[in-house]
Image (spheres, rainbow, N blue to C red):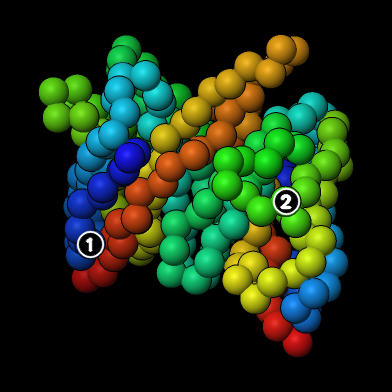
Amino acid sequence: QVQLQQSGAELTKPGSSVKISCKASGYTFTSYDISWIKQRPGQALEWIGAINPGSGGTGYNEKFKGKATLTVDKSSSTAFMQLSSLTPEDTAVYYCARSNFYYDGTSYGYYFDYWGQGVMVTVSS
Amino acid sequence: NTVMTQSPTSMFISVGDRVTMNCKASQNVGTNVDWYQQKTGQSPKLLIYGASNRYTGVPDRFTGSGSGTDFTLTISNMQAEDLAVYYCLQYNYNSNTFGAGTKLELK
């Protein structure tokens, strides 16, 4: 069965960086993009960006360029997101999600069909 | 970026109610809209993709409709297990945006 297993909670200081992981299993890792989504406490979801594990190609929400860096390790079927220059506004749960593309005969579509359990990142001095 | 405006922000409902919530896009997004359900303390789950396609295993009381700028998610016979926050998402490569969510609460 498809699973995305994320790393554990992080407590970090302002100005530092953190790297969280998302280990995929149950499918061919290089066949699907992985997206990352941010959710601040009690707030809505924000799409950060996505990576194609096969090519390493990335796409980012303009808001997160310079903040988030997405990478993968194909040998371990793991996606990573590094967040830099952390501030209290980066305190949030971060999810990874598998991005599934489809074609319905007339147009292409896209959805997040499997999600990780989320990683709580807390930035506090 | 395309802004997705969801309404209402919250709804107080009873089991058995018919529930309708809306999502309005700031520009034409065709049928590039998905709906997700997030229960307290859980990861979001996909309900509807491509505006109107029910995802595998989703009960048929959930129906999505719309195209262009106006989209609707309907729950035809509200169940207690449907209490959650519902988010719409519009997707264009490198420009995916979620709505702010509609929270369903019991009366």
Residue receiving disc 1: A9
A9 relative position to A94: left or right: left
Q: Nearer the viewer, residue B98 or A78?
A: A78
**Within-10-Å neighbours for mark 2: few <14, some 14–19, many 20+:** few
Q: Which of marks 1 and 2 is in front?
A: 2
**Dividing the picture into quarters, in which one does residue B67 lie?**
top right
Residue receiving disc 2: B60
**Dividing the picture into quarters, in which one does residue B69 lie?**
top right
User: Quick one: SS at disc 1?
Assistant: loop
Q: Residue at x 65, y 59 (%)?
A: B86
Residue A68: percent from left, percent from top: 34, 38
When the figure is inspected, residue A87 is found, relative to residue B48, above or below; the finding is below
- Among all residues in the image, which is located at the extreme bottom? B107
When the figure is inspected, residue A3 is found, relative to residue A104, above or below; the finding is below
Q: Which amino acid does label 2 sit on?
A: Asp
Q: Which residue is drawn at 77% across and 49% down?
A: B63
